[in-house]
């Protein structure tokens, strides 16, 4: 929110929304036909910049609005993320690429409102061959923090990579774009020298005064956190020196957001309550709120946003459903809102062809092309996998044989999300377990895929099993710390069609139990375990993309395919007109719901099918499972459908 009335938001399907009445009503300001990155910078009530992918030129560009999103200007190039603007003309970007526990930052700047960009000539703290000039290389798995503005560069180092306490907060500061670096070691509070340091980015109120939040963590022998504290350092000389503030907050987990409003008050969630400071983190108060801020497996705070000491909003997620609350008394009392999406004239986009092609924003590249490092580890008795630079996932080719299972091992951190899938599907199964021998997959329900939150920082073993001797394609993805999902693409050159999907889905080469209109191009299984048995009565859920250019099929593409299938309406998705229909069937206590989206484009019939297979709730002992959330599940499928692009 930019003030008490005007603000911006992203929907869970990637739509950009704008409000002018404090969140009561919202207008869709999504520019049509662009693949957006779900990021951007919102300078004020009317002004915003959005990184987008320009398919015509196969490069990143920017969209810019000065009228609240009613109209947009397309600029031919721009950074992918990390945008900051101090006014209408002057801005910068800190773009980060992550992979294999590393992060590589590149910096760029603009002085014409985002029309053209040039690299910022930063000299890294340590020279490193093979990287583009100006690239800052840090440890992502360590949770190193990096901050840039035109006045300073700040690096704060974390301990989560080595998991060995450093005994202080180690940082480096430069005021001349890296020509010189000042090293500092800030003392920890008394009794905390044995804690692991996990820094947040510094927060600056102005050119001189700022705040540095630091998480301090202590672990038990089994790898779980026994203590999680939040402390603060303050600076009054632009970051040249820092002093420890006396207050500290207990039970503040990693990656919990810390929010500063326009009044320079500080807010965060601590020990399942809302905490506020009205003196720049020197003292704190726990707010006696009438809203439950407790964090559980099914309930969490997604966004905490105060615009001043009185007015704020909270977006809560509970059982995959989001709720928006508003306070006008500093968090004491909260009102559940019922936000409405109101109709408006679709935004227009203007392309200014007079803008010259700007200097390319540097992105880190290495030669040769990065590939995963896989080598046998005799101690682990498995092939150890190390991700290539800039990568957060690997694809491995292997084969099962009569000599036994195929085992891989890799390291990851507590709280990271890992997903594993085998393209060949049902002939294979995967088992995931920690070095502590605790299995994460269900031995009673083996599958060719798995996804979950890792319980501790340690090695994890992925075992591939099969009843046949055959080759397989295995994908292992580990999301960066604090990132819940990462995205992948389905691309088919023959039919010139693409879909995007998150790691909540696994690509599996498997024919679903129905007759598609065309050739199956991709099958995506939904693998979030929280939706499934033994919690709910959901058995399986999947999405299939099909296509054909057969004239006979194209001529009847949008018609129903069987008795009992019902057309439910017409839907426009990215400019493509889809006919939506549904079919439901039941057998032996099972229910099969199918949702079809069909469209004809460039003399081709495209079909996207949702399959939801559930069991009758009466099949289970009373009270053992609950009815799965069909609305939330379909929203996951629709988010994939919303990425549909064909040429």
Image (cartoon, rainbow, N blue to C red):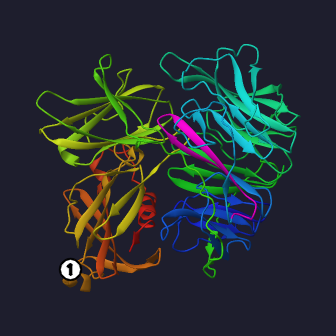
Q: Position of residue 539 (x, y in %)?
A: 29, 51
Looking at this view, is 257 or 83 the one in front?
83
Up-down relation of residue 416 to residue 575 (above or below) = above
For image coordinates 48% across by 26% down, the residue present is 457
Check residue 242 for magenta coloring: no
Dividing the image into 4 quarters, which one contains the N terminus?
A: bottom right
Horizontal side of 194 relative to 597 (left or right) equals right
Check residue 102 for magenta coloring: yes
**Residue 486 seen from this side:** yes
Which residue is situated farthest in the bottom direction here? 555
Q: Position of residue 522 (x, y in %)?
A: 29, 60
Q: Position of residue 364 (x, y in %)?
A: 53, 45
Dividing the image into 4 quarters, which one contains the C terminus?
A: bottom left
Q: Position of residue 287 (x, y in %)?
A: 78, 40
Q: Which residue is mark 1?
A: 550
For image coordinates 60% across by 68% down, the residue present is 76
For image coordinates 64% across by 39% down, the residue present is 256
Q: Tag 1: Cα neighbours inside 10 Å, few (<14), some, or many (≥20)? A: some
Up-down relation of residue 565 to residue 424 (above or below) = below
Horizontal side of 533 relative to 240 (left or right) equals left
Kindly state the secondary structure of the residue where label 1 is placed: loop
For image coordinates 69% across by 42% down, the residue present is 122
Looking at this view, is 101 or 124 the one in front?
124
Q: Which residues are magenta?
A: 94-114
Horizontal side of 36 relative to 248 (left or right) equals left
Q: Quadrant of residue 61?
A: bottom right
By secondary structure, the bulk of the magenta-drawn segment is best described as strand
Horizontal side of 333 relative to 79 (left or right) equals right
Looking at this view, is 556 or 365 the one in front?
365
Up-down relation of residue 369 to residue 196 (above or below) = below
Up-down relation of residue 7 to residue 264 (above or below) = below
């Amino acid at each position: 929110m930019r003030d008490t009335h005007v603000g911006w938001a992203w929907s869970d399907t990637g739509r950009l929304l704008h409000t002018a009445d404090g969140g009561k009503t919202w207008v869709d300001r999504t520019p049509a036909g662009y693949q957006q990155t779900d990021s951007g910078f919102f300078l004020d009530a009317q002004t915003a910049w959005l990184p987008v992918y320009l398919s015509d030129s196969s490069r990143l560009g920017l969209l810019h609005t000065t009228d609240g999103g009613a109209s947009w200007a397309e600029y031919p190039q721009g950074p992918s993320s990390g945008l900051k603007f101090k006014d209408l003309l002057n801005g910068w970007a800190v773009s980060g690429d992550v992979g294999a526990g590393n992060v590589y930052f590149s910096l760029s700047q603009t002085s014409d409102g985002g029309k053209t960009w040039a690299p910022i000539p930063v000299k890294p703290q340590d020279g490193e061959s093979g990287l583009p000039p100006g690239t800052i290389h840090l440890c992502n798995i360590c949770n190193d923090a990096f901050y840039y503005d035109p006045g300073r560069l700040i690096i704060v180092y974390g301990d989560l990579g080595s998991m060995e306490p450093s005994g202080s907060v180690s940082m480096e500061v430069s005021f001349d774009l890296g020509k010189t670096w000042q090293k500092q070691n800030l003392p920890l509070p008394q009794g905390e020298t044995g804690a692991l340091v996990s820094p947040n980015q510094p927060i600056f109120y102005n050119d001189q005064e700022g705040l540095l939040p630091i998480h301090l963590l202590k672990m038990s022998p089994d790898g779980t956190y026994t203590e999680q504290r939040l402390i603060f350092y303050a600076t009054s000389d632009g970051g040249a020196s820092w002093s420890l503030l006396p207050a500290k907050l207990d039970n503040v987990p990693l990656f919990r957001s810390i929010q500063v409003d326009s009044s320079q008050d500080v807010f965060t969630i601590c020990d399942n309550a809302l905490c506020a400071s009205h003196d720049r983190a020197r003292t704190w108060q726990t707010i006696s709120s009438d809203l439950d801020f407790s964090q559980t497996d099914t309930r969490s705070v997604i966004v905490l946003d105060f615009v001043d000491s009185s007015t704020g909003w909270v977006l809560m997620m509970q059982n995959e459903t989001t709720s928006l609350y508003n306070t006008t008394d500093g968090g004491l009392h909260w009102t559940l809102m019922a936000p409405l999406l109101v109709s408006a004239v679709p935004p227009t986009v203007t392309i200014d062809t007079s803008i010259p092609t700007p200097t390319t924003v540097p992105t880190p590249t290495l030669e040769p092309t990065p590939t995963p490092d896989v080598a046998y580890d005799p101690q682990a008795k498995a092939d150890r996998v190390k991700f290539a630079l800039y990568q957060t996932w690997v694809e491995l080719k292997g084969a099962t044989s009569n000599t036994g299972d195929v085992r891989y091992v890799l390291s990851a951190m507590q709280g990271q999300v890992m997903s594993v899938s085998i393209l060949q599907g049902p002939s294979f199964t995967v088992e995931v377990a920690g070095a502590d021998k605790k299995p994460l997959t269900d031995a009673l329900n083996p599958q060719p895929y798995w996804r979950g939150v890792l319980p501790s920082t340690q090695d994890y073993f992925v075992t591939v099993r099969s009843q046949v001797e055959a080759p397989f394609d295995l994908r292992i993805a580990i999301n960066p710390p604090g990132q819940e999902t990462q995205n992948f693409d389905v691309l088919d050159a023959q039919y010139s069609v693409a879909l995007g999907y998150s790691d909540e889905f696994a690509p599996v080469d498997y024919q679903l139990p129905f007759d598609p209109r065309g050739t199956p191009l991709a099958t995506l299984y939904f693998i979030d375990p929280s939706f499934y048995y033994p919690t709910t009565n959901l058995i399986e859920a999947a999405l299939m993309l099909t296509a054909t250019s057969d004239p006979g099929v194209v001529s009847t593409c949008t018609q129903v395919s069987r008795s009992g299938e019902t057309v439910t309406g017409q839907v426009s998705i990215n400019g493509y007109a889809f006919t939506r229909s549904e079919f439901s069937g039941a057998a032996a206590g099972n229910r099969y719901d199918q949702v079809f989206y069909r469209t004809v484009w460039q003399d081709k019939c495209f079909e996207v099918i949702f399959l939801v297979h559930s069991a009758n709730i009466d099949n289970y002992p009373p009270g053992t499972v609950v009815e799965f959330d069909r609305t939330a599940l379909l929203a996951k499928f629709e988010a994939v459908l919303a990425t549909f692009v064909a040429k």
